Image (cartoon, helix red, strand yellow):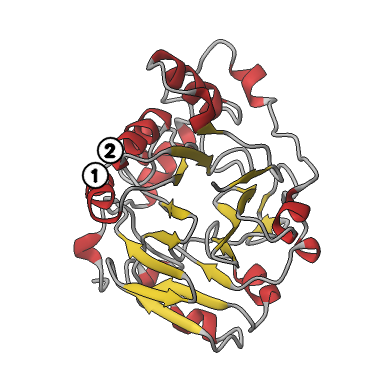
Amino acid sequence: MGKFDERATQPIRGSGDILKWKVLRRSDPRRDDFAALDAVRPGARDGGAAALASGEPCAVWIGHATWAFRLGGQVAVTDPVWSRALSGVVTRLVPPGVALEAMPPIDLVLVTHDHRDHMDLPTLARLGPAPLYIVPLGNGARIAKLGHPNIVELDWWQTHKVGALEITLVPARHWSMRSPWNRNDTLWGGYVVRGPEGVAYHSGDTAWGDHFAEIGARMGPIDWAMLPIGAYSPRWFMASQHIDPDEALRGYQALGARNLLAMHWGTFRLTDEAIGEPPERLRALWAERGLPDDRLWILDVGESRPLR
C-alpha cells in the first residue's frame, strides 16, 4: 500500500479500465462541431518574457499547468514543463509561451505532484540548482538526484516563508504515481502563495471536492486562482481526478476568488475532449451566470497579465 492511499481519490484502475477507455474512446457523446473545435490551437504571443523581466508583478501562461509569475520581487514557476514531449511520447501542440532561455532568473519552483505532465525531470534538470524547489512530502529525493540541493518538502497546510512570500501546500483530490510500484508513495497538492501584492492559488490536478471551500475559508481572500479546465473526458474515468469547466467555475466560486486563470488545456492531447472545447464551455458558463468578463483569464500561451 502507498503511504498516502488514504488521501487519494482515484479508484484503482487496472489494464481492463485502460483498455475500456481506449476502445470506447467515444463513450462521452461528441458534439457535432467536434472537428472544428479540435482544430483550435492557442496562438502564442510575444511579451511574456519582457513582462517578467520588467520587475512588475505579473503572471504568464507558459502552457498546460506551467505558469511563471512574479510576486514579492521573486519569480516562481509552477509544474515547469519546457520539454518538447512528455516522456518522449506525448508531443506539445504549441511551443512554450516563453522559451526557457528567455526566462529571467527563477527563484522558486513549485511542483504539485509526480505525474509526468507536472513533474518533468528533463525540465527540472535544465533549471539547475539555483532555485528553491518546493514539493509535497516524499518528492524531494527525485529533485536531489538531479543535483539540486535547495529543497523544501511540505505536508498539507504547512507553510514555508521565502522573503516576502508565504507558500502553503493545500489539499487536492488526486493521487500520485511515477511507476506501477510506487502508487501514492508521495503526496500531491496545490499551492497558495501569499505576497505583498495579493494571494495566488495553483490547484495542481484535482477532482471536485469540498477542499475548494476549505482553502478559501482558511487561506482567502484569493486574488488569482489558477484552475484546470481540460483533460476531463471521459467522465467515468476522469471525474475522480480532474475537474471539467463546470467544476472549475464551481471551484472558483467556492474559493471566493477574484479572478479565474484557466490552465491545463490546449498544450498536450491527454484525453478525449476537443482541444478547443474547455475554454469554449467555460466562456459559455461564465456568460450564463452573468459574471464580469474581466475576471476570467483564458490566456494564450505566452500572454501576460499584471497582478494587481
| Coordinates of residue 68 in the picture (x, y in percent) | 62, 57
Under circle 1, the secondary element is: helix
Q: Secondary structure at mark 2?
A: helix
Instruction: Name the residue that disc number 1 marks.
Output: 213
Residue 204 in percent (x, y) is at: 43, 54
Q: What's the CA distance linking mark 2 and mark 1?
A: 5 Å
Specify the label residue 254 is tagged with. 2
The residue sitting at 44% across, 33% down in the picture is: 233
Residue pictured at 60% horizontal, 62% vertical: 80
- Cβ atoms under marks 2 and 1 closer than 8 Å: yes
Judging depth in this view, the residue of 291 and 127 nearest the camera is 291
Which of the two discs, 2 and 1, labels the residue nearer the N terminus? Answer: 1
Question: Quick check: can you spot residue 246?
Answer: yes
Above or below: residue 277 compared with residue 266: above
Q: How many marks?
A: 2
Q: Report which quarter residue 225 is drawn in.
A: top left
What residue type is disc 1 on?
Ala
In this rendering, position of residue 269 left or right of residue 49: left
Question: Can the viewer see residue 29 in this picture?
Answer: no
Q: Quadrant of the N terminus?
A: bottom left
Characterize the local packing of mark 2: few (<14), some (14-19) or many (20 or more) Cα atoms within 10 angstroms: some
What numbered label is drawn on residue 302?
none
Q: Residue at x 35, y 33 (%)?
A: 247
Residue 110 point in image, percent of width and height: 50, 66
The one nearer the camera, 21 or 41, is 41
Asked if 85 appears above or below 2 in the picture, the reply is: above
Mark 1 residue crowding within 10 angstroms, few (<14) / some (14–19) / many (20+): some
Instruction: Name the residue located 53 percent from the left edge and 85 percent from the top edge.
Output: 150
Q: Is residue 235 above or below residue 34?
A: below
Answer left or right for 170 relative to 95. Answer: left
Amino acid at pointer 2: Ala
Please, is residue 60 above or below residue 127 in the view? Answer: above
